[in-house]
Image: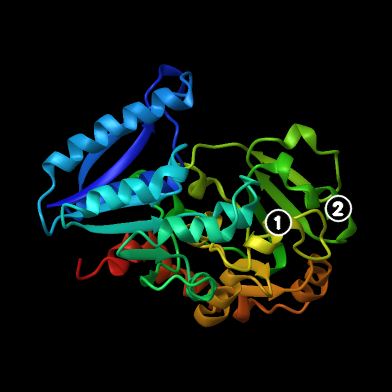
């Protein structure tokens, strides 16, 4: 038997909590035969309450497990990462195979400043199989002494309703003479956006919350904030931008550095919508872009005016065509299915 252990916010104020990536992965896992085993988390309760709830549900799962069963967890978990290795060790005592699908390394993102990469590795080494973003992340963890089996995902799948898929198909087609660049995310946290007026002749179309915190800038247009399932059909642009940090002169800060190791979920968003990518030269997703021919990589955003000025229609259409098979794979869950092949 195969199980996916899922944690969710159970209180009424958080019924929709959970990221698009984890929800899609859960749906794909269900299709692959992984039964849900849900553990509620209460945002209005203290840590001890949630720990007791976790222990109760984990022992229920423990009683269900038989030797040879599989249990898959998506990491990080909601509020219990410090106890993760004990949870995994307990379930492994039943002779089951423990699999971890890694969404983020919080020590690199500096989400929890008390965590170090060594601490995260000590949690992850309890598993039998770890699914990571890419070869760079795999090499980083191996350099920290992680010796378990690791497989790479390349991209997080992006599932959308059929009507959204049809809407995207009808909206394809952009001329190189009318290039706009889409950027989707939490706009208030993307400090580099405040410098986009220093890029003459470039038009940016912004999607997401936080636009009201940005000063008005020429060449910047807010296109709205949309549900993640609807957003791919709303992206009206020629390229999708992957960038982070405080400046257009390079990806700086913790999140800018993190791009050297992770494959951002927004890469999947853009590619599903048929948008070639613009990303940092040294980013991990840059390796994917160059290998698949689905965009361009740059060292800083000041390179954009010259790059787009010399971009030919044939070059652009070649990149756009290369997104088509990737979009189909994303929409069908193929990346996660391939990573779990044989399980």
Q: How many numbered marks appear?
A: 2
Q: Is residue 50 left or right of residue 55?
A: right
Picture residue at 33% right of the left edge, 27% below the top: 53
Q: Quadrant of residue 77?
A: top left
Between disc 1 and disc 2, the foreground one is 1
- Say which of 85 and 209 sits in front: 85
In the depicted structure, whether residue 262 falls above or below residue 109? below
* Front position in the image: 127 or 238: 127
Measured as percent of width and height from the top left, residue 72 is found at 28, 53
Left or right relative to 225: residue 304:
right
Neighbourhood count class around disc 2 (C-alpha, 10 Å): few under 14, some 14–19, many 20 upward? some
Judge by depth and name the residue closer to the eye, 192 or 245.
245
* Element carrying mark 2: helix
Q: Earlier in the sequence, mark 1 or mark 2?
A: 2
- Colouring of the image: rainbow
Which residue is pictured at 49% across the width and 48% down the height?
233
Q: Quadrant of residue 42?
A: top left
326 vs 156, nearest the viewer: 156
Q: Position of residue 183 (x, y in %)?
A: 66, 52
In contact (CB < 8 Å): disc 1 and disc 2: no
Q: Which residue is mark 2?
A: 195
Q: Give the secondary structure at mark 1.
A: helix
Which residue carries the number 1 mark? 254
Q: Position of residue 49 (x, y in %)?
A: 40, 22
Task: Give the residue drawn at x 68%, y 79%.
Answer: 312
234 up-or-down from 157: above or below: above
């Amino acid at each position: 038997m195969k199980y996916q252990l899922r944690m969710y916010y159970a209180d009424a104020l958080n019924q929709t909590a959970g990221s698009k990536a984890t929800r899609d992965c859960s749906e794909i896992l269900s299709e692959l035969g992984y039964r849900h085993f849900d553990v509620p988390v209460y945002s209005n309760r203290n840590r001890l309450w949630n720990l007791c709830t976790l222990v109760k549900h984990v022992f229920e799962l423990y009683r269900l497990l038989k030797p040879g069963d599989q249990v898959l967890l998506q990491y990080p978990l909601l509020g219990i990462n410090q106890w993760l290795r004990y949870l995994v060790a307990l379930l492994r005592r039943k002779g089951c195979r423990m699999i971890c699908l890694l969404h983020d390394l919080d020590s690199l993102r500096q989400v929890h400043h008390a965590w170090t990469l060594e601490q995260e590795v000590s949690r992850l080494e309890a598993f039998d199989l770890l699914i990571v973003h890419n070869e760079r992340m795999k090499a980083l963890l191996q350099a920290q002494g992680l010796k378990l089996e690791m497989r790479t995902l390349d991209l997080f799948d992006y599932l959308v309703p059929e009507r959204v898929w049809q809407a995207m198909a009808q909206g394809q087609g952009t001329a190189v003479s009318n290039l706009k660049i889409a950027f989707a995310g939490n706009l208030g946290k993307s400090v580099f956006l405040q410098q986009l007026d220093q890029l003459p002749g470039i038009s940016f179309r912004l999607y997401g919350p936080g636009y009201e915190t940005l000063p008005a800038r020429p060449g910047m247009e807010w296109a709205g904030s949309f549900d993640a399932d609807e957003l791919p059909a709303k992206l009206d642009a020629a390229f999708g931008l992957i960038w982070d940090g405080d400046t257009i002169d390079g990806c700086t800060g913790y999140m800018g550095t993190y791009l050297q190791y992770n494959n951002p979920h927004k890469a999947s968003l853009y590619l599903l919508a048929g948008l070639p990518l613009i990303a940092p030269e040294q980013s991990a997703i840059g390796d994917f872009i160059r290998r698949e021919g689905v965009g361009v990589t740059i060292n800083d955003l000041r390179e954009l005016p010259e790059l787009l000025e010399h971009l030919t229609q044939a070059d652009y259409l070649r990149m756009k065509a290369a997104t088509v098979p990737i979009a189909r794979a994303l929409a069908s869950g193929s990346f996660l299915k391939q990573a779990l092949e044989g399980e």
